[in-house]
Image (spheres, grey):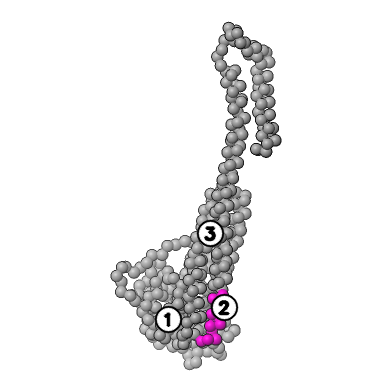
Amino acid sequence: MARKRRKRYHPPGTQPGTLAAHDEAGDAPVRITSFRYVADRCEERTVSPSEVPSLSPPEGGVLWLDVCGLSDPSVVQAIGDRFRIHSLALEDVLNVPQRPKVEWYDDHLLVVLREIRYPELPEQMAFLLADRVVVSFQERPGDAFEPVRERLRQGKGRIRAEGADFLLYSLCDSVLDAFFPTLERLGDEVEEMEERLLVSPVPETFVAIRRLKRELLAVRHAVWPARDALNLLLIEEHALIRPGTKVFFRDCYDHTIQLMDMVETFREMASGLVDEYMSAVSNRMNEIMKVLTVMATIFIPLTFIVGVYGMNFDTKASPYNMPELTWAYGYPALLLLMAAVAGGMLYYFRRKRWI
């Protein structure tokens, strides 16, 4: 999951409600898929932007417009005109990235969530709920909605028999469920990092820990406000959300609580990895300094011996004669003495458990 900084596209002083594509939207065409369903059938087809003004839910059923791509603001405007969506809600759809939230209007509401699926970039998901109509907006192809589409196509579960608010719940639940595999992968990475630290605390491991912390922070920024947004759906009264559907939204809210617990746990573990890395590096440095100190300490008396016998004294003229200088075995005897000194010091250091 790469890190990418988004740029805001509205210049200062822009009139509220102005629709404009964000910088990363590109020029890919917008794809609109229509699902018109009732309890016993579901009609799925791809519609063109020119057909949007004529779209309507079936008699007694629900219309779901699945919009992929935000490169053409005129498509968003056409959808807003057809279903009388507030201009500020349409602006929030195109304003990427948007903080997850819920906005209430007179006859419709806006739900904005963030979807994170490894290894894809974070993606904004916006949902508009009106009378028997749900419109979902996503930035690029690929999402977590395929199970919902399959249930609509095959008539499994209760989704066809319920209203548009239940479809909104199903889509939100799919977005939140996509977080769990990502967090499980991040949790596996945390455990792997811990094992790598014990074996080899190299700088590359520290860089990987920093990247892992950034990814966990991105998940937290997506889940924390989503929890507050879903809580609003539970406590606020709106004609579009039936009391029976709030029970299912409570399940979504419970998922956000579980996700937050996982995120906070992994973040604490990742922070602990930084401390473990610094401690491992410090311990490794101490071991290196200990070895170097022992080596220097051993060579101090050897340097002293070599220095004494390296002084330029005339031993024949000096009253303090150094007989070993003229002794036939003086040189090997001196080497043995130096080896004995070094060995004795190593034995002493080991007895003291300094090495």
Q: Which residue is mark 1?
A: 104
Tag 3: Cα neighbours inside 10 Å, few (<14), some, or many (≥20)?
many
Quadrant hosting residue 107? bottom left
- The residue located at (54%, 57%) in the rendering is 271
Between disc 2 and disc 1, whose residue precedes? 1
Specify the amino acid type for callout 2: Asp
Task: Assign a secondary structure to mark 2.
Answer: helix
Establish if 202 lies above or below 60. above
Horizontal side of residue 235 vs 20, given as left or right: right
Q: Give the CA distance from mark 2 to mark 3.
A: 29 Å
Q: Which residue is mark 2?
A: 251
Q: Position of residue 17 (x, y in %)?
A: 34, 76
Horizontal side of residue 53 vs 349, given as left or right: left
- The residue located at (49%, 64%) in the rendering is 218
Between disc 2 and disc 3, whose residue precedes? 3
Is residue 44 shown to the viewer in this render? no
Specify the amino acid type for callout 1: Trp
- Tell me if residue 200 is in the magenta stretch: no
Q: Which residue is mark 3?
A: 212
Q: Give the CA distance from mark 1 to mark 3.
A: 36 Å
Horizontal side of residue 168 vs 351, given as left or right: left
Specify the amino acid type for callout 3: Leu
Span shown in magenta: 242-254
- The residue located at (37%, 71%) in the rendering is 21
Is residue 270 shown to the viewer in this render? yes
